[in-house]
Image (cartoon, rainbow, N blue to C red):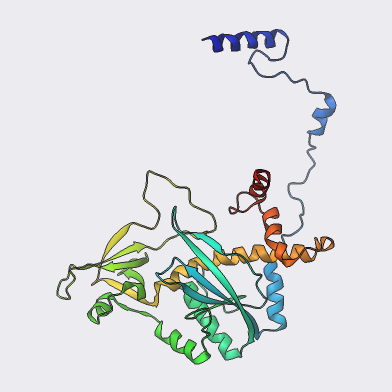
């Protein structure tokens, strides 16, 4: 009560001296010049021209046009998709900048780390490039079919499978892998053949149901004669931006963790392993990350050239030009960290 009385007496004195009005709001006398500064004329156009946004992929497309048979290669190593590291090879017309490990946020608590290793560039024949284009469309189309409604082969980057960071497949091995991963088959057939390790399965789809599922395990008491047997599966995520974390909410379960039961009799399994479909929704976020690094490197070599920054300063440039709403590494966090240090 004493605090309330002191506040009331203060407001009375402020009001008497004309510092607050009858609504207890600060009194501010506007001068004519200040008001005129914020006035706008009615003859201002509804639209005005602006400088177009810099598209770094136009530079990549030009490099591909100049030399369509040369590709730079980067091994992407995913930790968190499967029990062991999962590898893909990314091929681009330009050399991708070296970047630190990329953290992708699968749900509120689970993350996937992407490490990258540079490989020497290579020259490919037209037949080899066409095979890699088909493989890239297959991997992306397994999870992004709604985006790739009309197949286009003028891709600026390619994805091909590999066993490890050192194992580079030749053309014949890629052709064999492409043939083996075509189409789908019944889940019941896989189980009857003894292929019970669902980690090697592809995405599941029930009859007449467009929803995709990631297989988890098979019902323990399964018997081929039991028509009511199930495969436990998790619905495939609809999320596409994995660079930003998901806010944790205590009132619901973590995203992509609810297990559903699908009838083995009615389920169909893709011949493309699920790990490739998961990577298909993660790679666009990885490419967004690389795009930011390419842009920062272009700033270093053009606008910031007089400063003579080294390539090792690219992460610092990226941090300085990144707004707080994009990713955990941004200019506000940079300032906060420097003051803390």
Q: Residue at x 82, y 33 (%)?
A: 37
Q: Which one is nearer the viewer's eye here, 227 or 198?
A: 198
Above-or-below relation of 183 to 83: below
Viewer can see residue 144: no
x and y, in percent, of residue 111 in the image: 47, 59
In this picture, residue 213 sits left or right of residue 63: left
- Total residue callouts: 0
Q: Quadrant of residue 296?
A: bottom right
Above-or-below relation of 141 to 33: below
Q: Which one is nearer the viewer's eye here, 34 or 63?
A: 63
In this picture, residue 323 sits left or right of residue 82: right
- Residue sitting farthest toward the left: 225
x and y, in percent, of residue 126 in the image: 60, 89
Q: Residue at x 56, y 86 (%)?
A: 130
Above-or-below relation of 230 to 170: above
Q: Quadrant of residue 220?
A: bottom left
In this picture, residue 28 sits left or right of residue 255: right
Q: Residue at x 44, y 54 (%)?
A: 109
x and y, in percent, of residue 303 in the image: 80, 61
Viewer can see residue 48: yes
x and y, in percent, of residue 232 in the image: 28, 64
């Amino acid at each position: 009560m004493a605090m309330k009385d002191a506040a009331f007496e203060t407001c009375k004195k402020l009001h008497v001296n004309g510092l607050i009005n009858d609504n207890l709001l600060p009194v501010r006398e506007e001068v004519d010049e200040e008001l005129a500064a914020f006035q706008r004329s009615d003859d201002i156009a509804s639209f005005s021209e602006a400088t177009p946004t810099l598209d770094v992929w136009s530079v990549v497309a030009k490099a591909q046009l100049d030399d369509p048979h040369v590709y730079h290669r980067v091994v992407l190593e995913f930790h968190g998709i499967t029990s062991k590291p999962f590898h893909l090879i990314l091929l681009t017309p330009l050399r991708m900048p070296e970047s630190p490990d990329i953290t992708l946020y699968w749900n509120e608590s689970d993350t996937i780390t992407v490490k990258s290793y540079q490989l020497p560039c290579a020259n490919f024949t037209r037949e080899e490039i066409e095979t890699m284009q088909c493989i890239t469309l297959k991997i992306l189309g397994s999870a992004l079919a709604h985006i790739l409604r009309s197949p286009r082969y003028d891709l600026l980057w390619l994805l091909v499978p590999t066993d490890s960071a050192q194992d580079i497949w030749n053309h014949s091995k890629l052709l064999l892998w492409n043939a083996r991963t075509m189409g789908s088959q019944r889940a019941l057939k896989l189980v009857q053949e003894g292929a019970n390790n669902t980690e090697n399965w592809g995405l599941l789809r029930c009859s007449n149901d467009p929803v995709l599922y990631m297989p988890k395990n098979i019902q323990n008491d399964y018997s081929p004669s039991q028509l009511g047997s199930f495969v436990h599966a998790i619905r495939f995520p609809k999320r596409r931006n994995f660079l930003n974390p998901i806010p944790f909410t205590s009132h619901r379960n973590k995203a992509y963790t609810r297990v559903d039961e699908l009838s083995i009799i009615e389920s169909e399994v893709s011949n493309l392993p699920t790990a490739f479909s998961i990577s298909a929704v993660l790679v666009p976020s990885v490419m967004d990350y690389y795009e930011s690094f390419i842009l920062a490197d272009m700033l270093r070599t053009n606008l910031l050239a007089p400063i003579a920054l080294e390539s090792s300063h690219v992460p610092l440039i990226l941090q300085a030009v990144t707004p707080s709403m994009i990713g955990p590494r941004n200019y506000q966090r940079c300032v906060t960290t420097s003051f803390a240090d």
